[in-house]
Image: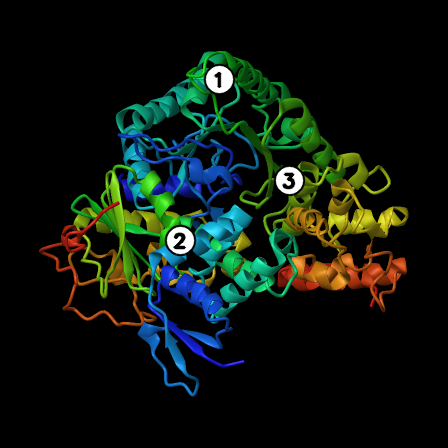
Amino acid sequence: MVEVIYRYDGSLEGFLCCVFDSYVNKEVPWAFQDEAHLAQSLFPVRWVGTDLRHAQRILVSLEKIDPWARELVVKGFLTCAADREMILYRFIRALYSVGKPLLRQLSDDALLPLLKAVRHLDGEVHLLKGFVRFSEFEGMLAGEIRPKNRVLPLLRHHFCSRMYNETFLLYDRTYREALVHQPGKWAILPLEEFRMAAPSAAEAQYRRLWKRFYDTIEIKERHNPKLRRTHMPQRYWDTMTEFQDESFFLAGTDALPASAGDPGGTGPEAGALSRERPAASLPPAPPSLH
Amino acid sequence: MDVMEKLTILTDAAKYDAACTSSGASRGSRAGYIGNTSSSVAGCCHTFSADGRCVTLLKVLMTNCCVYDCKYCVNRCSNDTRRAAFTPEELADLTIQFYRRNYIEGLFLSSGVMVSPDYTTERMIRCLELLRYHYRFNGYIHAKAIPGTAPELVQRLGLLADRLSVNIELPSERGLQTLAPNKTRKAIFRPMGLITSTLRENKEELVKYRHAPRFAPAGQSTQMIIGATPDSDRHILSLTQALYDKYRLKRVFFSAYVPVVENTLLPSPDTKPPLLREHRLYQADWLLRFYGFRAEELLDEDDPNFNPLVDPKCSWALKHPAFFPVEVNTASREELLRVPGIGTVSTRRILYARRARKLEHEDLRKLGVVMKRAQYFITCKGKILDGVCRRPDSILRNLAALERAALPASEGEQLSLFDPA
């Protein structure tokens, strides 16, 4: 068998076209490469262009086998599994050859890795529904998360319906994209950098009130930090109000959420929200809100 | 006194209330209203305090002024503590602002008894009306019904709140007599019964009129204090079961007694809260609600308290060797649920997956079954896993060893008293 690497544009549709082309070319790719993360390789590389009709055909075929199969593939592509394309590819191939019964073989090697990745994603989405924190800037809300999986598409429905009348922005530091919402419309847009403006006096006061509530609600006689970490892994803490250092609770200073683990670093310039023009200026005029 | 101080005092006074769930209500968002409760179907924790308890709701008292003198309570009138009261406006504003920032799922409103139960409830109603009608708050509200409140007021409260609760406080009448002289069993069960019957009537009304106002859509719950009185686990669990059966409660919460006051009638102030006991009761509570167990199966007169070494399900399994081993490929849902190491999720997965082909031991591990526990109690295609010794004493020893690792250090020490080694 020829060992070949498939390179695609990094989108779900692009990946599905790889699946499509592998059947057309009667070959099994050795690996998949996102064009954004180019690496030298010893194997020949095949560039796969994205054809939405091909992608659609794959999705429809999955849906026909079982709606759950389609859901697994769409969600699977959002996971942070290191070899998610290969996991998905193996699953789709096995599904086409075995058919619907594969979906009941929960311990099968073609299905189990995908199930695990999707459970991890769903778990993170569930936790973040609670752990997201917003701050108010002149009537608009803004929040940041640093998830492992690409959760914004799955958090969208929850926050857009709960915050039906609010204008808000939720920034994903890991995948550099933002969910923006105005009453009745939303979009998920790539955004290289985002920096929260310093809080107003009122905002800082609510942050302090929340911190006080959080500290007071503990029953000291039951102190159990291990149990807390079990329920709420420490990697979520750096974007949560109650775990910020003192400067976060002061109005008007250049306070920003602790960004120790921030991959891009938060420079004061580019795309930053200045105090004079707070979050309302972001994002730069959403082109097409759905 | 500013809001910060009030919040501190009234949170501190409310923190011993165990209930902090937001599950059971499902109300979509509406144009012009703030929030929804639809995510709450499965419950949503917004943070965890340093004691590891989930924080879902803004849990505060309307006021910690109280005319009662319950011995176990920090807010009893004879206690020398700072008193405060929120105005309905302050509390409504806090709730809305916390909710918008996604700090909380809603409000948990309880109160000390100021002047009289009716007066206190009216104040609570005023705050909730402000939230529901003025701010158009559509999120979750849990309100405490105070024993002795007029039925009409409880009705009004229930139309504003998603869930109502009446605290049983102490599991027995005798406990109430000695520790809560102003409360009687009858006074506690009266509002509880009233809420149950109103819920039933409301259900019938909703069948007839789709837009009938909904009374406490997330139902009713209660809580009791564990360890302040000498009641046995068996008594507490039977009471819990009766509450589920008779009063159709959604949840019964247990709260390990934290000695807050010195009183000859109470455990001494340096007693540690009985956390392991509370944990065992919650495990048993889950067995009642999701696993089809009955209280009388779990504990009997000869054995009125839970085994500290192993959880109630393992304990039951060890006492009923004739029930096991269970053949995973043919057992019913009810049988699978009784196997230690198999929970509701893995039961569902087993039932789903075994229709494709027969399952092996190796498959079960991949389905999420905790084989360390389950291996002693199951067969796959008639076979017990190789090398597993099913002698009762060796099973107990192994299960207890598994359990010890999962408990907090202090509980581990407590257990070592019973350790045969």
Q: Quadrant of residue B156?
A: top left
Q: Secondary structure at mark 3?
A: loop
Residue at 55% over, 63% down: A93
From where the camera sits, is residue B22 visible? no
> How does the figure colour the protein chain or chains?
rainbow
Question: How many angstroms separate mark 3 from mark 1 (CA)?
Answer: 26 Å
Q: Chain of mark 3?
A: B
Indicate the position of residue B326 as horizontal and vertical percent values. Answer: 83, 50
- What count of labels does the image hold? 3
In this image, A233 relative to B332: left or right? left
**Viewer-nearest residue: A87 or B178:** A87
Q: Chain of mark 1?
A: B
Q: Amino acid at mark 3?
A: Ala
Above or below, comparing residue B10 to residue A122 in the picture:
above
**Viewer-nearest residue: A229 or B11:** A229
Q: Secondary structure at mark 1?
A: loop
To the question of a shared chain for discs 3 and 1, the answer is: yes
In this image, A122 relative to B411: left or right? left
To the question of a shared chain for discs 2 and 1, the answer is: no
Question: How many angstroms separate mark 2 from mark 3 (CA)?
Answer: 64 Å
Dot 2 corresponds to which residue? A56
Dot 3 corresponds to which residue? B228
Above or below, comparing residue A130 to residue A148 in the picture:
above
Say if mark 3 contacts mark 1, CB within 8 Å: no
Dot 1 corresponds to which residue? B149
Above or below, comparing residue A170 to residue A263 in the picture:
above
Residue at 46% over, 39% down: B40
